[in-house]
Amino acid sequence: MHSLRLIKVAGKSIVKNKMRTLLTMLGIIIGVGAVIVMVAIGEGAQSQIENQIKNLGTNMLVITPGTSNAGGVNQGASSFNRLNIDDSEKIRNESAFIAGVSPVVFTRTQIVGGTGNWRSTIHGVTTEYVTIRDWELTSGRFFDASEERTGKKVIVLGATIAENLFPNGDAVGTRVLVRNVPMDVIGVLEKKGQTPDGNDQDDVALAPVLTVQRRLSNWTFIRQILANTYSPDDIDEAQVELRAIMRESHGLAEWEPDDFEIKNQDQLSEAAQGTTEVMTMLLAAIASISLLVGGIGIMNIMLVSVTERTREIGIRMAIGARGADVLTQFLIESIVMSILGGAIGVAIGVGGANLLGTTMGWNTVVNSQTVMIALIFSGAVGIFFGFYPARKAAALNPIDALRFE
Amino acid sequence: MSEKRAVIKVREIRKTYQMGKTKVHALQGVDFTVLQGELVAIMGASGSGKSTLMNIIGGLDYPTSGSYVLDDIEISKLGKNDLADIRNQKIGFVFQGFNLLARTSALENTELPLLYDRSNRIKKHREAARRSLERVGLGDRADHHPNELSGGQQQRVAIARALVTNPALVLADEPTGNLDSRTTVEVMKLFQELNDEGVTIILVTHEDEVARYAKRIVELRDGKIIRDVPQEPDSAADDLAELVARGADDPTIEELETADAD
C-alpha cells in the first residue's frame, strides 16, 4: 500500500519532468538499442551457420577411418582405412539407438549426358542415406532396397549436376554415362547449399553402394559410415554404443587404440560456430560498453537532480517522508526510467535489426532471450546507478535541505 | 477552560553546536508549555535561538539535552523514522518560502503529507485535501499549479497542506516574510480563524506586525526566554476591513493577479 503510493509519487515526478526524463533515458535507449542490433547481427550469422550444419542431416553420427601408428610414426587422420560394409551391417543389426546407417564410398569422375558432361563425385550409399542427411528429392524417386541389394545401375543427381547437364529440368528418365557405364537417372535431389566451409553439397550424385563398388571403382573399403539416431537425446549413448560395436567388428584387443573416429554433429559444428560466437561476444561487449555508459549517464543526471531537487527533498522530509521513502522514490524513478529506456531501446533495436535485414540483406535474429536480458540488465543498471544518488538524497538533513537555495 | 491539555511541554531544552573549535550555545535551558487552542508568537532577533527552537519543536532536530513532550509523546529520544512520523502526523509546517512542489497542483500539494502517513488514519486523500483547501478558501483553485497562484494563495495552499493531517500543532516559520502588508493581514486573519476553530498555532517571527495578532508572546534572546506574556490580540479581520475601506480604489497586486488567473 505504502510502496504503491511511492511508485505513484515517482511516476508523477517522471511524467512532470519530461525533458529530464528523456535525457536520463537517452543513454539507456542507445545502449540497449545497440546491444539488440549487435547481438541480432551476431546471432543472425550464427543461425545461418547452424542452418548449414543442420543441412548436413539430423541426429547424425559420422564414422571415419582412424589413424595408423606404425613404429611411432603417426600417419594422421584417415591414413589407416579399415571401414567396410560389414561394419555398417553390424551396426544396422546390433545397435539399439541407430535408426539408419549408410556406408559411403566416393569416386570422382566425369558424368556424360544431357547437354554435355560434368565432373563430380559419385557417392555410393544405401537407401537410408537420404533420411540420415534429411534430404528431399525435387523430382523422381530414390532407389529402393532391391535396387540397392542387386546393385542396379541407377543414379540420383544433385541439384548442381542436374542444373548443368539438364538445364530444362528433364533429367529424370534419361540415361547418363559414368565411366562408360550407362546409368538411369531416377531422381534429382533438393538444393542444400554450401557447407560452412564453402563446399557445394549439391555437386554430388548418389548411387547404390554396391553399384559404385562393383561398376565404378574397385574399392572395397569405404570412406565413411553415416548413421542417425532416433532422437537427438540418444546421440551420446549411441556414440558409446557405436564405438563398442566398431571395436568388436574390427576385433580390437583391450590395449589397442581405436582405428576409427566417431563424430557427432555438435563436434562437427563446434569449430564453425566458434568463430561466430567470438564475433557475437565481441559485438555484445562493444554494445555493453555503451549500455554501461548509459548507466553512468543515469547516475550523472540523477546526481545532478538530487542537488537540483534538494529543496523538494527537504519539503518531503519536513512533512513526514522518512529517509527510506525518499530513497525508494529516487530508486524507483531511476529503475522506471532505465526500464522504460530499455523498452524503447528494444523497440529501436528490433526496428534497426529488421531495417538492416531488409536494406542490407544481413541475416539478423532477435530472440526473446536477448530482449529479456537487455531489459533485466537495464533494470539492474537503474538499481546500480540509481542507488548512490538515491542514498545521497535520503541522507540529506531536512533543515539544510529546506534552507538550500 | 482552565484544564486545557498541554500540546507542548518543553523542559530545560539545551542545544549546543560545535562550530570548529568553539561551542555555540544556541539554546540554554528553555522552558515553556503551549496549551491546546493557543496562538503563540515566538519572537526574537536573528541569533536569538528561535530557529533552533522551532527546528526542535518541529521535530527536525534533536535537543542536546532536556525534555520535549508533544501531545504526550516524549520526542527528544525518538529515532529518525519515528520523528518523521511525528512530523507527518502531529505537526503541520508552514514555511516562509511556501515550499510547495512545482508543477504540482494545489490539490496534490495539499495531499502530499497523506502519502507519507503510515497510520492511514485518513482514508480518502483526495477528499481530505479538497476539504482542507476549502477551509483556507481555495476550493476553486484546486487544479492550479503554484506558479498560477499569488503569494498569498500559495501560502494558503501551504496552510491547507499543514492542516490536512489534523495535526496537534501548526508551526509557522515567518509565514508572512515573503508577503506584502495586505496579504500578511489576510494570512493572519486565516490563522486567527483557524485558531478560533481550535487549532493550536505557533508562529515564529521577528516582526511585531505579525506578533500582535497572537494571544501570547514568547521572546527569546541569547538562547533564553526573556519574556513570556499573554496579550489581547488585534483582530486581523478588523484590520483587513480597514485596509479595504481605505484602499478600495487601489487594488493590490494580489487582486490583480487573481483577476488574471480567472
Image (cartoon, coloured by chain):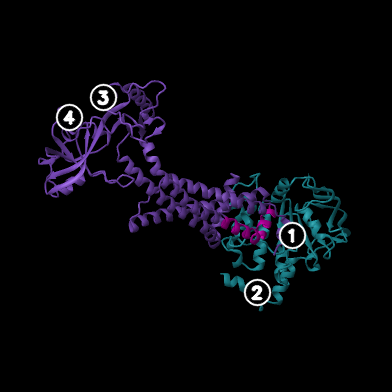
Q: Which residue is mark 2?
A: B253
Please give the range of residues in magenta: A296-319
The residue depicted at 49 percent of the width and 48 percent of the height is A375
Q: Is residue B192 above or below residue A5?
A: below
Tell me the residue that label 3 is attached to: A86
Q: Position of residue A151 (x, y in %)?
A: 15, 30
Quadrant of image for the C terminus of chain B: bottom right
- Which sits earlier in the primary sequence, circle 4 or circle 3? 3
With A66 as the anchor, is A380 left or right in this view?
right
Question: What residue is drawn where x is 40% and y is 46%?
Answer: A367
Same chain, labels 2 and 3: no
Q: Are marks 2 and 1 in contact (CB under 8 Å)?
A: no
Overall secondary structure of the magenta section = helix
Circle 2 sits in a helix, a strand or a loop, which is it? helix
- Asked if one can make out residue A399 in the rendered structure from this viewpoint, the answer is yes
Residues behind callouts 2 and 1 on a single chain: yes
Residue placed under numbered mark 4 in the picture: A148
> Which secondary structure lies at badge 3?
helix
Mark nearest the camera among 1 and 4 is 4
In which chain is the residue bearing label 4? A
Helix, strand or loop for disc 1: strand
Q: CA distance from mark 4 to mark 3?
A: 15 Å
Tag 1 near tag 4, CB within 8 Å: no
Percent position of residue A63, x then y: 32, 31
Q: Is residue A316 magenta?
A: yes
Amino acid on which disc 1 is placed: Ala
